[in-house]
Amino acid sequence: MRRERHTIGELEELVLLVIGILGDNAYGISVKNEVEKHTGRSLTISAVHAVLLRLEKKKLVTSQMGGGTSARGGRRKRLFQLTGMGKDAISEAKEIRLKLWDLMPDTP
Amino acid sequence: MNSLNNKFKEDSLVPRFPRKLLRHFCNPNYLEGIEGDLQERYENRQERLSPVLNGLIYWSESFGFMRPLFWRDDLWDTKVGEIEMLKSHLKFAFRNIRKNLFFSTINIVGLAIGIAVVLFIFFYIQDEMGYDKFAENHNRIHRVVVEGQFSGNEFNMANVGGIVGPTMLKDFPEVETYTRFDDWGIFFVRHEDIAFKEYSIISADSNFFSFLSLPVVQGDPDHILTIPEGVAISETAARKYFGDENPVGKVLHFDERETYTVTGIFKDIPGNAHFNADFVVSHAGNDDVDIDGWTNCNYYTLILLSENATVQSLQEKLPLLMNTYGWPELEALGLDVKSLLASGVYWDFKLQPLKAVHFDIVHGTGLKPPTDIKYIYIFAAIALFILMIASINFINLSTAKSANRAKEVGIKKVVGSLRKDLILQFLTESVVLSLIALFLSMIFVILVKPVFFNILGHEFPISILDNIGLGLLLISIVVFTGILAGTFPAFILSRFKPVAVLKGEMRHAMRKGWMRSFLVVFQFTASITMIISTLVIFNQLKYMQNRNLGFDKEHVLIIDDPYILRDQAKIFKSELLKHPDILNGTLSGYLPVESYRNETGFWPDGDMNDPRVRPLERWLIDADYFETLSIQFLEGRNFSREFSTDSSAVIINKACQEYFGWENPLNHSIGRYETADAMSTFPIIGVVDNFHFSSLKNTIEPIVFFLRDHAGHLALKIKGDLPGVISYTEQTWKSMAPTQPFSYRFMDESYNREYHAELSMLKLFRSFAVLAIFIGCLGLFGLSAFSAEKKTKEIGIHKVHGASIPRLIYYLSKEFTMLVFVAIVIASPVTWLLMNTWLQGYAYRIDLGLGVFLLSGFLALAIALLTVSYHAVKASLLNPVKSLRYE
């Protein structure tokens, strides 16, 4: 399988960043809450899971099953972490943004 | 997948269905995390939300995961597989339709016509049943009608005395409010120099518009009918007389005799109201309305039932009206009420719900003609009939055609087709065909709409949007038909062993045509019934048009409304008689065709207590009346200018003489209350033969003729050059009344117009008959094609042995003609019964003879033979060698 450079959408970028922030506790609900907290936008839980699934397919994140709690009836959480490619993707996006901001004239 | 069920403790009552759904669809790798998240959120919400709301949110969140992205891989594959299979079925369906374009077209067209017919009938019935529903409280509105009997004659009227409404309001708490209106008649209406003859003029109480929820477009709704000598006009009338100007305050002249001030404009009365009105004159200032007597019939009275009242409780109280007020009023006039009542006279007020008003054919009304509800039932039955015929046709043809598919099925099975898929294949084809038919039927409806309205005589809106329910019902019927049609071949064919099928052995089983025969018989029975009915209606109509009526309606020119000439009317008549082609003329409003009628009570010999008193026709004529119309005298003499006393004498017709049972009528007289308390008697000087002056449905009623000036119409007996006469008449009119519109008609035309209801019925039945036959023939055409094709080999052999073409035709059509015979035998007695019942409604009617039945049978047979022989001939012309080689 050849290595592809995937472009990431805005939501995907946000989610990737949030996964970085959340560290060991990045799963569906926590990602949703974190994104909503910082952006003020509301997402449905299924939308968040869809993004996570797509990111995993693009190999920008990995996941593994983690701690189950009684609140979940004992079900475990699927915890997500950035891959190397994932980190590259968001830092690249950041660089492009900064570059463009620099190029803007200073006129208010 | 279901391992999860056992793994976790039975957690709080999360809705089970969405969870089951998710577990079925979702990829097991993701399931735990997703289900866990859903669970966690549910539990977090539990504190602050009710379980119901929480559950709903859980449902919603779960359904968010119902997308292909989360699906299990194997599900994905089967779903995709199923979609592909369906696409393939559709592809084959269309391909098959193309391959058998002939059959397919016949099939589709037949079904489409059937559906279109059903649609029309449905919309018609819907329109008829929806009359007067625009009134806001239509469920609580009732009309007061009266049913009475005077000396053995019943009469039922839809209007009652003006005093009834207000008395009911005063005395009965069940009546919340009432309104009255009256048909005012026909007038010449003029504003400045725009004048027209108007037919839709009524007078009404001040609350008329609000009572019936009729919107007022201009003017104050509360006061639009409160001004004496005021008239409200419709939008159409406003445009006609005033263009764009504001008509309020302007003056309208009625017959040059009365003037009314326009008080406002109302929106045109809806087409589905039981009355028409372009002008509504106010009752305000007219004292006669409220004192209009108990036994008069002048005002249509509608009452609004109070909210908690029942109809029965009000109905029970109605007899109080006559007992408390009505009979005493008549006694005060000198009538011996006791003996009248003893002889069986009664005058009962009845309540009639608004929704029944449009269908009321019992109570006489001067408003729009009602619809006999029997026709609604008849049409519904016809709709069902035709739909059945079309559907059966469809099933028939599909089944027949599918016998050819045996080989295809065999090969498919050999290659490994699942039975399920074969069945699905046939079903898909049928359903596709029927859906195309549905689509085509809609196009038919749109195209035929104007013709349909033309036959019916009036329009109504046809809209799919109002009838989503109907749309869904239709789709399900059509799909059901399609499924039904596809089922038989689908199941039978898919059952057979491939080898047998390929060898052609199963052909014999499909040959079993008993079902097909039954269906053909059914179709033709329906068609023949239609044909016979059409012929009978046609004959009755012809009879009514040609029967000797007792007067001569040919070559009679009627000039309308010479009363507008006032005292010039007689001069007008004498001027016209100077024309050589105008032979005779009579000034009278009372003609045997549609014109004036007047009933009033008559007492034989002026005897106040004679129980034979009853309302009789009272006609006002001049001395030339009977001669102009060629009415024969049986006894006595005509009115004559030589006898000055003739103005107080009368002539009666034979029916009148028979009613009173007089052997020597010239020795008798007839009495009438010319004023409220004095009876005048009139000696009888002549008796004329009966003539028909109303529909042939009715027996001839008694008439009493008076010699009076009445210029309602001028009837002229003419000969020869029609246009010349008409232009002379018009010129004369114009010279005497230049501003009044000149209007004329011919008596025979007027007479024929009386029967437009029957004419409509004839047209409709004719159309239905044609349709039924067409669909039946379509089916027969298809079936015989199939039959001829199957018998190709046999025909070939027959030909080789020297059979002639007619013989072959006979051979091929034997099967079908026998069926048509059976259909004739079944249809005839049934139709005889139906037509006999219909004819009973006509006092003067034809005899239902054998001729009609023979003719119809012959017609049906001829058509069937023609249809079948097309294929027979074609088949018999084939080269026998080719036929024998046909596989």
Image: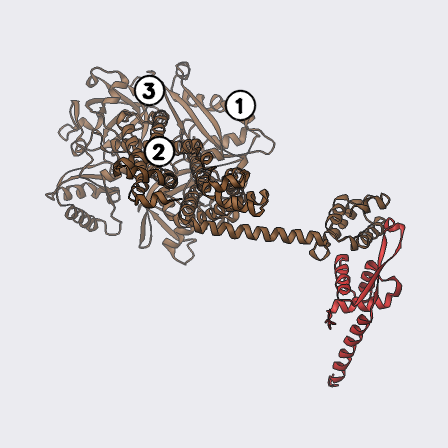
C-beta proximity under 8 Å, tags 2 and 3: no
Q: Compared with residue B175, is residue B19 higher up or lower down, i.e. above or below?
A: below
Which callout, 2 or 1, points to the residue nearer the camera?
2
Find disc 3 in the rendering and name its residue: B613
Q: Chain of mark 3?
A: B
Which callout, 2 or 3, points to the residue nearer the camera?
2
Left or right for A56, reference B647: right
**Label 1 secondary element:** helix
Q: Which mark is residue B211?
A: none
Q: Nearer the viewer, residue B752 or B93?
A: B93
Q: Compared with residue B807, is residue B15 higher up or lower down, i.e. above or below?
A: below
Q: Amino acid at mark 3?
A: Val
Chain-order first, disc 1 or disc 3: 1
Task: Give coordinates of residue B833: x percent, y percent.
Answer: 36, 24
Q: CA distance from mark 2 to mark 1?
A: 63 Å
User: Chain coloured brown: which letter?
Assistant: B
Find disc 1 in the rendering and name its residue: B316
Find disc 2 in the rendering and name its residue: B816
Q: Quadrant of residue B761?
A: top left
Q: Are marks 2 and 3 on the same chain?
A: yes
Q: Amino acid at mark 2?
A: Phe
Q: Colour of chain A?
A: red
